[in-house]
Image (cartoon, rainbow, N blue to C red):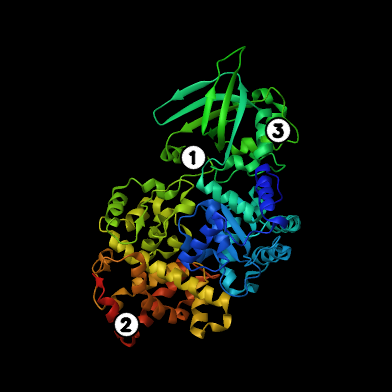
């Protein structure tokens, strides 16, 4: 909000100089906009997907299609909420109003920022029964996550492709107040940080640059230190020393959150509470500066280069080129946001690291950043089953399986459209093999819980079976995105059956429920007993996209009967109890009608190996 960062201010100034009046050029598109259009085209998404693109750049999500399916609100009555994203693993929630201008403008309309007040009121303050059906499950999921202490960062975004403005900034300040008042009704609200932000052209440029490069502050600095200890290895070198609080205060005042380009969450801000760690850092810095060194864990910073002068008169000069703080964002932000420079005797432990390879840099960020918790799938990246699957996937067309491995920040924009994300694979297997609720609500447990992991990743789990299950889930997600896009463009164009299908798919967890239901009906579909469902695969070596095409007629038939699954939802979300109650009844109905669908089933069965 506003242009607190000189780097952002300079970017805006350059933009204004190039485009008088602050109007974005229509003759050449910035890199971020080209990347957004590519993502939009790859997944056939509406303009609301600009909110998903912002989420991708900010958080580095694994699966664009899955996030778009979950986050973009379906139905015309969205109560001014275009995107709602809840990530319990990141402990973050995003509510977004999205706007894509088709022609140059000086700024985005401020009234759409004000609309976020309406979105917040409906999502957080209105009885669930009064919400549109398409929002009930989403709102209940959000409220449950907040009540359970699973949300620590609450983002309210106005996302667009135009220059930012003071008018929008003023509206978002009011939105922040609305959010604070509504969240105060939840017991866990004291632990939630609220960020109402305008994400426009210049912010996208920063996020895109951050995704391209780990270090975006590339200036050269000189700092005087009392002494240094250097450790040098073949792939990296590191300098351990202390810096003054005044130097860190000035650094943060100049570059603000750009200093945290490699840090997923950055500085979370301070609240006037003894329990708040950032407020405690400030208090220690001001009241006990001489003890700060032993009270604080210090800072780890990636640098592009550093040089050390000889020690003279008890001090040394260190010249640093480029800096990104990967651990110690809270220390940096707390000290940097003090109204004046801290006492001169405040010394902060710091470690400067220069790495020679992208792999080392990625691991420095990953293991040093306390805010970047290791992703659950990372625990299995060296598992023999994952290694075998990665090898098998080398022969699958148009498919790149990660197998638990994750790259650095640049993967957020470089990820191939053929990527088969580990999490989504786990979710598709879990749903197909009997656990749709875990697939929907506890995806990390698939990787961290030994019994759940071994239940779906077995010695018989092959790459082609993964394609069989993943292709089904992907096709269901694509169906929902198609219907949502069609309704956004022209609600009257939807048939009654399509309206019914979209209403069903707007229930939280409905995609995983469908995968499970189809797996329970699979013997009726293929017309044969199946001794082991892990042996199911398509006869031809298909890409996931081609597999999804084969599943489409089956999905259409099951969706036509989706009203028989109404009891599978509780408050528009699936639960173990409701699924166990509804699915057997549906399977009975489906089996009784299988003769009506014989031609469709026979055509599909011809493509399947058992």
Q: Is disc 2 placed on a helix, strand or loop?
A: helix
Q: Is disc 1 placed on a helix, strand or loop?
A: helix
Separation (CA) of disc 1 from disc 3: 28 Å
Mark 1 neighbour class, 10 Å CA radius: few under 14, some 14 to 19, many 20 or more: many
Q: Residue at x 64, y 66 (%)?
A: 103
**Which mark is on residue 600?**
2
In the picture, measured across the screen, residue 500 lies left or right of residue 346, that is left
Separation (CA) of disc 2 from disc 1: 51 Å
Mark 2 neighbour class, 10 Å CA radius: few under 14, some 14 to 19, many 20 or more: some
User: Which is more N-terminal, label 3 or label 2?
Assistant: 3
Separation (CA) of disc 2 from disc 3: 70 Å
In the picture, measured across the screen, residue 297 lies left or right of residue 236, that is right
Q: Is residue 90 visible?
A: no
Q: Residue at x 70, y 65 (%)?
A: 112
Cβ–Cβ under 8 Å for marks 2 and 1: no
Q: Quadrant of residue 154?
A: bottom right
Q: Is disc 3 placed on a helix, strand or loop?
A: helix
């Amino acid at each position: 909000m506003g242009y607190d960062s000189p780097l952002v201010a300079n970017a805006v100034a350059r933009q204004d100089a190039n485009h008088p009046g602050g109007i974005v050029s229509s003759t050449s598109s910035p890199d971020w906009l080209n990347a957004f259009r590519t993502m939009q085209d790859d997944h056939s998404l509406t303009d609301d997907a600009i909110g998903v693109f912002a989420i991708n750049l900010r958080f580095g999500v694994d699966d664009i299609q899955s996030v778009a399916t979950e986050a973009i609100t379906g139905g015309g009555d969205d109560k001014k909420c275009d995107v709602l994203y809840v990530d319990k693993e990141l402990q973050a929630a995003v509510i977004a109003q999205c706007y894509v201008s088709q022609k140059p403008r000086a700024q985005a309309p401020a009234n759409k920022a004000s609309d976020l007040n309406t979105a917040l009121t409906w999502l957080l303050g209105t009885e669930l029964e009064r919400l549109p059906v398409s929002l009930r499950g989403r709102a209940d999921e959000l409220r449950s996550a907040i009540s359970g202490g699973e949300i620590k960062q609450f983002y309210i975004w106005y996302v667009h492709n135009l220059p930012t403005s003071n008018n929008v900034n003023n509206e978002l300040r009011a939105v922040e107040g609305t959010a604070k008042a509504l969240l105060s009704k939840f017991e866990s609200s004291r632990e939630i940080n609220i960020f109402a932000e305008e994400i426009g052209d210049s912010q996208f440029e920063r996020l895109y640059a951050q995704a391209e490069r780990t270090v975006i502050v590339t200036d050269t600095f000189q700092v005087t230190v009392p002494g240094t200890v250097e450790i040098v290895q073949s792939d990296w070198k590191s300098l351990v020393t202390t810096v003054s609080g005044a130097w860190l205060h000035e650094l943060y005042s100049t570059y603000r959150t750009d200093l945290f380009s490699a840090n997923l969450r950055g500085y979370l801000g301070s609240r006037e509470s003894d329990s708040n760690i950032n407020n405690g850092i400030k208090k220690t810095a001001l009241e006990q500066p001489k003890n700060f060194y032993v009270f604080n864990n210090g800072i780890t910073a990636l640098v592009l280069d550093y040089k050390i002068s000889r020690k003279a008169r008890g001090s040394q000069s260190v010249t640093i080129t480029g800096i990104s703080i990967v651990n110690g964002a809270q220390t940096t932000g707390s000290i940097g946001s003090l109204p004046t420079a801290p006492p001169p005797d405040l010394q902060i432990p710091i470690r400067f690291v220069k790495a020679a390879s992208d792999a080392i840099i990625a691991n420095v960020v990953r293991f040093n950043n306390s805010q970047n918790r290791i992703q659950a799938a990372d625990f299995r990246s060296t598992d023999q089953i994952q290694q075998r699957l990665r090898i098998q996937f080398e022969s699958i067309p148009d498919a790149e399986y990660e197998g638990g491995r994750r790259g650095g920040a640049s993967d957020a924009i470089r990820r191939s459209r053929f990527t088969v994300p580990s999490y989504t694979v786990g979710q598709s297997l879990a749903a197909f093999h009997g656990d749709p609720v875990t697939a929907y609500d506890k995806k990390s447990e698939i990787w961290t819980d030994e019994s759940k992991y071994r239940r779906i990743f077995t010695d018989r789990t092959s790459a082609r079976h993964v394609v069989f299950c993943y292709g089904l889930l992907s096709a269901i997600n694509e169906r929902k995105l198609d219907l949502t896009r069609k309704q956004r463009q022209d609600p009257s164009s939807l048939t009654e059956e399509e309206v019914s299908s979209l209403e069903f798919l707007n229930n939280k967890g409905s995609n995983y429920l469908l995968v499970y239901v189809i797996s329970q009906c699979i013997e009726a579909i293929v017309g044969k007993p199946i001794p082991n469902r892990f042996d199911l695969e398509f006869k031809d070596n298909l890409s996931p996209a081609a597999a999804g095409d084969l599943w489409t007629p089956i999905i259409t038939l099951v969706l036509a009967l989706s009203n028989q699954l109404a009891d599978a939802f509780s408050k528009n979300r699936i639960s173990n109890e409701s699924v166990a109650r509804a699915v057997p009844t549906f399977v009975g109905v489906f089996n009784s009608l299988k003769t009506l669908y014989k031609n469709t089933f026979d055509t599909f069965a011809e493509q399947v190996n058992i």
